[in-house]
Amino acid sequence: MNASCQFTDAILAHFLDGDTLPIEIEVDGWVNSYTADELAAHRGDCDECALAMASARRLDALVASSTDTDLDDDVADAWFATVAQRFEPTETVPERGARRWWLPLGAAACVAAGYVFSQLLHSPPETAPMPEPVIEPEIVEVVPQQVLPPPPRDLIALPRRSPRAPSEVRGRATPRVASPSEVDTACVANAWMRAVALGLPRTREQLRADAEVASADLKVDAFQRLLAGDSRRALPAIAARVAGWRGEGLDEVVDAVRNHVTVVSRLGSAVVIADDEMLAAAAIVGGSTIDRRIRRRVRGDLAESDAVVGAMTRVTHRPGRAALIVRLFEELRVRGAIADEFELAVQWFVPQPASCTSELVELLRRSRGADDRRICMLGLAARADASASEALIEVVEGASQDDALLAAFALGQFESGADDLDARPLRREYLRVTALACRRDAEVAARLAAMRLSLEEHLFLLAGGFNEQQFKIAASLFRGRRGHSSLSDE
Amino acid sequence: MRPQLGALSALARRITGEQHWAEDLVQETLVRAFRGLDKFRGDSGLRTWLIRILVRLSKEPSRWRRGEKAGPLEIEIPDSMSATPEDRVVERELRDRLEEALERLTPRQRAAFHLRAVEGMDYRAIARSLDCTAVAARMLVLGARRKVMARMGRHLDV
């Protein structure tokens, strides 16, 4: 707003904010007070003020609608719990006058006990006979040294101690937590040393398998401890652990993060600005708030969207997985950033775990937007999961012709015999037959024989395996050249 | 106090520009409010009293914030209800620009504008919340609005 009219502020204050304070306006070097009627008269004549009023109204409405003043009960509970903790006494302070008379006595007793113990240790055996250690020969198996495997190479190469950062030396630094690879190595080393000590011949592969089991438990325990600490300071470490997790235990760890309201909240805030590791961790953890922020962060960027979708494949249970992928897909689609939609659907939806299909089906059933439904059906087509068959058949039988065509295309991607489509007459029979032709179902050959087709068309329909465009052509052929009364569209 | 938490949280988010700082600020506000509950005389509403504590605290970050870098302003953006994808893109861009524009205001301007546009407070109530005069509150609101409108340019044209 480059207001050159001196009245604009007064008009806004009076008519938009309900200002009843006297306002003085400088016009042509003279400062005057203006009444409400005079301001109203000016407002009626001045285009600039009228435009400013309209823009300011829109701005206020935009700010109000962009601000979420709702708060989850869980968050409110967590806040009140934190506040309540602040009022609890942290330690019992002894009364000023009360003397701890027992402290010197206890210290003297400790010194005396230490002296007696050291005398016992250093005394000759004849004065204080020690019991002989009992060795059971049948338990200890002596194995020749050459049978033992050499220590793992990466163990030898591991530095004994990492150099300390200056901040660590000073004290109040984030406590260093071993990286997953360091934990793995430590577990292999531990298993190797135990095997050597017990004289058990173990191959390197056996040792590594043992170590993997042990390291998964250790890593989960370490992560739980990290989570229980100060979530603000530990957030980068938590994100790094989640994003860099390898092997078993990821679902357990992610569940622990999801149950930690504060960490989820901090992660949601950080994902908009933070590094790729934070983004990957957020993609794995998920949830409506985090997903909304992920969308803001990766809006229109295929590379970042790819990273998010890739991260999601690593966790089995994730709320809103399909919804987020559909949203990201849509963002790219409206920007014209997708060359081949089905190929992207294959790339994004196929690697996702099985639960993605049911989420897509749910989304397809309740979605009212044509774009969303299209992406859902492309996803189902890419996944070719027969559990979605019923939902897709419902769409083929539905009111929308475009949806029916795409749903039939999705059904055509299933394996032949994966569902009962071949034995199930539909209202749009030509779409059913096209889907079967796409699957190269045996039933189609008989149908083709009854149709009036050129050799080229015949071979095209017989070949099957259509892409989306080819499917449309095939459907129009089955519909237009039908030699069979059953291939009606109603 | 629970019904006031949403409004407090939104204002704290607007002032601090970061969700977890906003949480810290609201929590500290609650602590101060509980401690000083006996001093609440009811001259103003509970919400105004809490907002006043929050705004005062926001000026002293060391009391509720511990050495962490600030991020950009974080605003919850509800999902769009526009009809077409193109409309949605335009609306999202509009909201992004709004976010950037608000980020450039001073914390007091942000607070004043938020209290006016979101809470619907008049200048006198804003003045009570921000510990200033009503004229100063008017200057803060108008200044904030002018800056944001200048930054958003034709995006606000009706």
Image (cartoon, coloured by chain):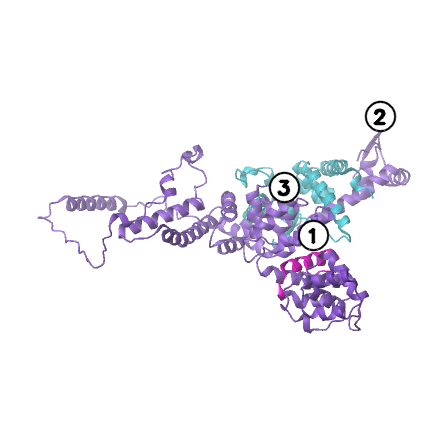
Chain colours: A purple, B cyan
Main SS category, magenta section: helix
> Residue A163, percent across and down?
40, 34
Q: Residue at x 78, y 68 (%)?
A: A451
Which of the two discs, 1 and 3, sits closer to the camera?
1
Q: Which label was assigned to residue A341?
A: 1
**Three-letter code, disc 3:** Gly
Q: Are marks 2 and 1 in contact (CB under 8 Å)?
A: no
**Residue A399 locus on image (x, y percent):** 78, 66
Amino acid at dot 1 = Glu
Q: Find the distance from the CA under tag 1 to the CA under tag 3.
A: 37 Å
Q: Nearer the viewer, residue A336 or B94?
A: A336
Q: Secondary structure at mark 2?
A: loop
Q: Which residue is tagged 2?
A: A29
A32 displayed left or right of A223 = right
The stretch in magenta equals A367-386
Q: Position of residue A158 (x, y in %)?
A: 38, 40
- The N terminus of chain A, quarter of image: top right
Chain of the residue that carries numbered disc 2 in the rendered image = A
